[in-house]
Image (tube, rainbow, N blue to C red):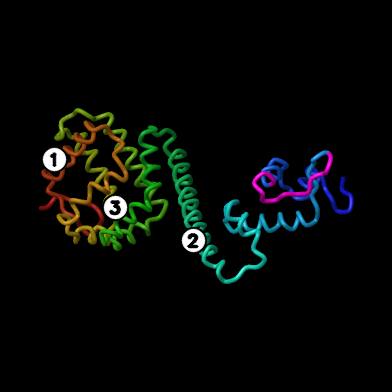
Amino acid sequence: MQEQNKYSVGEFSEKTGISIRTLHYYDEIGLLQPEKHPSSGHRIYTHQDILTLQKIISLKFLGYSLNEIIHLMHEPRFTVDLNETLTFHFQALEKEKERIDQSMAAIKRVIRLLEEEGEVDSTILFSLIHGMQTENIQKEWMEQHQLSDVMEGLSKKTEEEKVTLDQTFIQLAKEVKQLYGKPAEDPEVQEMIQTYLEASLEFLGEDLIQTLADLNVAELEPDIEELENISPSPFTEAEQSWLNAAMEYYMKHQDFKWNFWGDEKPRS
């Protein structure tokens, strides 16, 4: 066609880079309605339609939905009143960026784990991913309970440190499956508990350990279950009970204390 700056839907699609299917949809919802040929009914696009499409693309770029764009297209001019919706969309995009950044960090962490471990039990891996996914919820919980110092300390941990702790947890999970059912006092069981606790305390570090030691755990205890529910255990109920009993035995018989080197040692 292309007579006097007029285009068929195919020509208009090629010129603008917008698919024919999308152009048809925009026509159906009243967003971009070209002229129609009086006899054939075929769509005829003009240069004005190109300008209209530019407005649509610009508003989509700013984050507006198609329904919102339909209403905005009828505005002859914009004033400072538009700032309210622009601010809303900016905040929405910030949240989406934060979600994408978090997902990218989690993907890198999982890639690193699989490269180094070779194979990870699916239940354990999904438990770790769920923990990464809910990190923001855990931060909100800490803020609500005035644990900003703890949150700040954890936020400073490097990806290398996080991966190392993940590997420690994966090893714990493997050993729980292997040793489950043995008595809590079994040397292998106690060695498993000691290795995991020492690695966890090393991850926390001196400053964070001191901060945690200063907390009034009794006041937090009623709400700790809420935090645990955010990232449920990957173990069966029986395995978790057995693991808890093994840890309680270790703590009771080692009578360990927190020290400033990020690990635990028996009191003399």
202 is higher (above) or lower (below) than 40: below
- Does the magenta segment cover residue 126? no
Nearer-N-terminus badge (2/1): 2
Amino acid found under the numbered disc labelled 1: Tyr
256 left or right of 228 in image: left
Would residue 28 be counted in the magenta stretch? yes
Q: Residues within 10 Å of mark 3 (few under 14, many from 20)?
A: some
Mark number, residue 202:
3
Compare residues 52 and 112 and report the one nearer the observer: 52
Q: Name the residue located 26 percent from the left edge and 55 percent from the top edge.
A: 262
Q: Residues within 10 Å of mark 2 (few under 14, many from 20)?
A: few
Residue marked by disc 1:
249
Q: Where does residue 26 sit, x and y in percent of width and height? A: 67, 47
Which quadrant of the structure image shows residue 43? top right
Q: Tell me which segment is drawn in magenta.
A: 27-39
**Image quadrant for the N terminus?**
top right
Question: Looking at the image, is mark 2 or mark 1 nearer the viewer?
Answer: 2
116 with respect to 213 (left or right): right
> What residue would you read off at disc 2?
91
On the rendered structure, is 35 left or right of 147? right
**Residue 259 versus residue 34 in the image, above or below:** below
Dot 2: what SS? helix
**Number of numbered discs on residues:** 3
Q: CA distance from mark 3 to mark 1?
A: 21 Å
Q: To which quarter of the image does residue 23 belong?
A: top right
Q: Label 3, secondary structure: give it.
A: helix
